[in-house]
Image: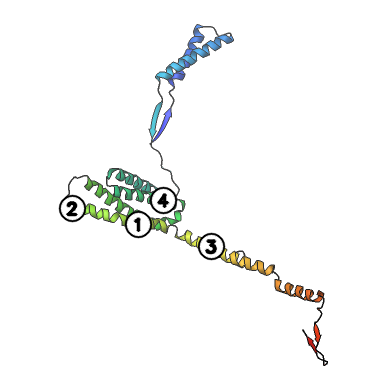
Amino acid sequence: MKKIVHKPAAPLYAAAAAWVLYALLFPLYRPGHFVIALAASAVVYGIARLFCKDIVEEVPQEPETTGNQELDQMIAQGKGALDEMRRLNDSIQDAAISAQIERLSQVSDKIFQQVQKNPSQLPQIRKFMSYYLPTTLKLLRAYDDMSRQGVQGENITGTMEKVEGMMATIVLAFEKQLDSLFGDQAMDISTDITVLDNMMAREGLTGGDAVHQAAQENPVADPQPELDIRNAEDAQTQPPQAEDSVDAGNGITLEL
């Protein structure tokens, strides 16, 4: 319901009546007279306002629509499901079940938000909305009802244990439903990454390729030839050493 606040009209009528009454009883041919009349009307308005309260009107609030009937139905059903999960979470005392209901509520809310942003994904959650979600709520309602009976009979205990054992599977199924909504986006991102990587590699902008290309464009000279040249130059500039020889007589010279 939407609340509309209306200001009461009685104080305005009272202020107008005070102005007319002053005009009949007192002269109004000087500026001061008008000031007094205005002040008297304001006082009467303030007093009347204290006794006349605002009128609050409640009108049905029209639901917001997206223009897509199926999407509007999903939003309304999703809101109702989330409200019911919160109620069940408050009612059920078991801590483990309560934590799982909280997780279901969070995942379900994200599913509804994702589909609301991308209405084309509505077909992907039709079974979720028509079967999985309402069946889960049915199980939780039964669990809540049985947990408040105060009886440990075979039927009640056995049913509650089955629901408890099923909750982990339900949570996992809801999470997979949310994950499936990002399948197309994941494929697009994977394709973009592959194309980007190939383009950068072709342009020599990726790690090892960039270093290799830089080495080809700016080769480093081998230092060994310079050493050989310096050695040759040193050999040419070095003065020849005198050879030591000893004349051993009989015409034979021994080189030392």
Residue 103's spot in the image, x, y percent?
A: 36, 50
Tag in front: 3 or 4: 3
- Disc on the earlier residue, 3 or 2: 2
Instruction: Indicate the secondary structure of the residue bearing disc 1.
Output: helix
Per the rendering, the mark at residue 145 is none
- Mark pair 1, 3: CA separation: 29 Å
For this view, does 227 lie left or right of residue 91?
right
Amino acid at pointer 2: Asn
Numbered circle sitting on residue 155: 2
Residue type at numbered disc 1 = Leu
Type of amino acid at the residue the image marks with label 4 = Lys
Q: Where does the image place residue 200, in percent across and percent down from the top left?
A: 60, 64
Q: Which residue is mark 4?
A: 110
Q: Residue at x 42, y 29 (%)?
A: 5
Cβ atoms under marks 4 and 1 closer than 8 Å: no
- The residue to which callout 1 is attached is 172
